[in-house]
Image: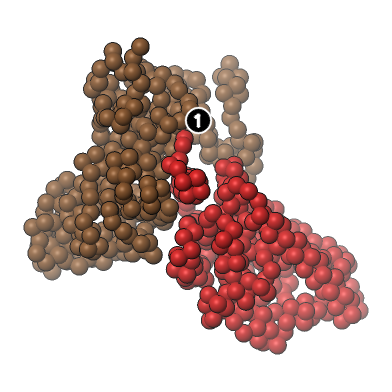
Chain colours: A brown, B red
Amino acid sequence: MREEAYLGVDVGSISTKGVVIDGDNHILASAYIWTEGDPIGAVKRLIADLDGQFDHDRWAIRATGTTGSARKLVGAVLGATVVKNEITAHAVGTTTFHPDVRTILEIGGQDSKIILLENGIAIDYAMNTLCAAGTGAFLSSQSRRLGIPVEDMGAVALKSAHPTHIAARCTVFAESDLVHKIQVGHTKEDIVAGLCQAVVGNYLNNVGKGKRIREPIVFQGGVSKNIGVVKAFEKALGEPVIVDDNGHLMGAIGAAILARGGEARADFNFDIEDIAFVTREVVCGRCPNRCEIICVYRDGQLIDSWGNRCENGEITVRQAQKHHA
Amino acid sequence: MARPQTLTVGMPRALLYHRYAVLWQTYFDALGIATVVSEETNREIAEGGIAAATDEMCLSLKVYLGHVAALIGKCDRIFIPRIVDFGIRRVMCTTFEGLPDIAANIFRDRHIDILSCNISVQGGIDEKAGMVQMGRELGYSKKEAKRAYKRALVAQRAADEAAAAAAEHLYQSRGLKIAVGAHAYVMDDDYYGRPVLDYLSEMGVTAIPAYAVDRREARKVTKRLSPTMKWEVSREIAGSLAMHLDDVDGIILMSVYPCALDSMVNDMLVRKFRDSGVPMMHLTMDAQSGTAGLETRLESFIDILSMRRTGKAVKA
């Protein structure tokens, strides 16, 4: 009898993360790759990567959890037993490793969030609304403009003694302000440091507005890998900010823990690499709402669909088969 | 006096229709005027409104214009009242002050015949005077118009009282309860607000409209929160939320983008209610957003509320 293991997958707009954990939260395998606008392709590469990392004779994956903005799609592809939003997954993952955490700051590719906790229980949260200013997408577009790889921005920022003030309320304005600052002669170091401060200022004024930020503070999401932003947070908050080595995996770990805690069990096998998954958008014409319904096919068979506002747009597996025949 | 017997009045099912449906319908019925109400908002209506409107208008006004467009050709006149205020510090959003003019200008090439009435207590015309005057302009006697208004008022009051009583009943129910602070025209809109309410009920949450409340009492309570807040409907909603803080697990503040009133009032509410510890969430609807972000926000908010209630981390 093989021992039980659990798979957690977190598919975000920019990166795709996966872990395999055992019953005691030990990480048996982990991977972090770019989504590159293709969540299904990314998940296949992720699974192939995880596949080679742990001993299949000893461990069997008995439950799978998915999270992140593509959680539904990837949940259908992987046959997940749990599909959970990334806020809950992050809270569960982080409190497992930092039981006393009271504030989680999270800045990802297009979302930023704050989660407040008390005694390991999330009590309040907020998420950016309407725009992605100050998120990873903002930093990577500015890094391209400056010709500095996004991975190096943190180190560059630390060299600055006088960070340039950059108006970062809106990505479009920030960009023109940035161009102006370059043209009048600010150094790249100062500008990058200014960008890091702008990200923090924007975050605290939007997502963090009105929230009591108390330590211990854990900072995660892709942007937490940028030491310049970490330092800017510490300066603005006047408190130490913890960045976990596995911070980028917390969503995936949370999803795996949620799958473990759930009742459903489904053996996961790694054969999805050879299966063709196709998604198709169908516009329902049964009423003026014209819902865009997403259908997911596994080797030509419909396995799931969503996006309909009412039962008129329900596409059942049976209907699809009839249509196919 | 000649009576326009064959007149059909169209009512856009948007904005204040969600507040005054009974009043307006009963009034026209009592006068024997045929009415037609535009159907529930759907994508076609919403997109039509967004296309007709200017960028700076709030989403609800855009939707309203879609409803006006949907009524063109289906009625003789379109009822678009001008509702300014109900007294000092009891004013409506300026949108409602300009509504007939906005619609007339937006649809100036389509020659719509707008039926309006003016209501401004500070301007010397209360609701009764405004609606009686409209009846007289339609060719009815003062007595007939007064009788119609009286019947309409009784019916609207009964409906409001029933709604408030139903809400009070919901505050006493078991299970997770969320008070929704939103204008009726946001919350009750079939295309924008309804999916949120449907999702909440799917998750087993009881959503209670804050606007369904004893309005006089709610306005009084708001005075303690902010002595200077001047918007009639915002005062009702803010007061209602304050009255029921202890009865709910959480509060969702749902607004359309951009809403000047909500941007100020909701920000104040977050600060005023912070010590109560009741989690609050903002949901902003704009013309672009899909439902994916909405589900993530709602699901995680409900997770947090259930964790607080049970004191345990959430189970899948």
Residue B134 in percent (x, y) is at: 78, 77
Q: Answer whether residue A83 is visible to the viewer in this image.
A: yes
Residue A168 in percent (x, y) is at: 28, 63
- Residue B223 is drawn in which quadrant? bottom right
Look at the picture and state if A1 lies above or below B292: above
Nearer to me, A126 or A287: A126
Residue B167 in percent (x, y) is at: 68, 58
Question: In the rendered view, does A222 fall on the left or right side of B181?
Answer: left
Q: Answer whether residue A279 is visible to the viewer in this image.
A: no
- The subunit carrying tag 1 is A
* Number of marks in picture: 1
Residue at (45, 43) in percent of width and height: B312
Residue pointed to by mark 1: A295
Question: In the rendered view, does A270 fall on the left or right side of B79?
Answer: left
**In the structure shown, which secondary structural element does the residue marked by tag 1 occupy?**
strand
Nearer to me, B103 or B81: B81
Residue at (28, 13) in percent of width and height: A57
- Residue B28 is drawn in which quadrant? bottom right
Please rate how many residues cluster around mark 1, counting C-alpha atoms within 10 Å: few if below 14, some from 14 to 19, many from 20: many
What kind of residue is marked 1?
Answer: Cys
In the displayed orientation, state which residue is furthest to the right. B1
Residue at (70, 53) in percent of width and height: B39
Nearer to me, B149 or B224: B224
Look at the picture and state if A22 lies above or below B261: above
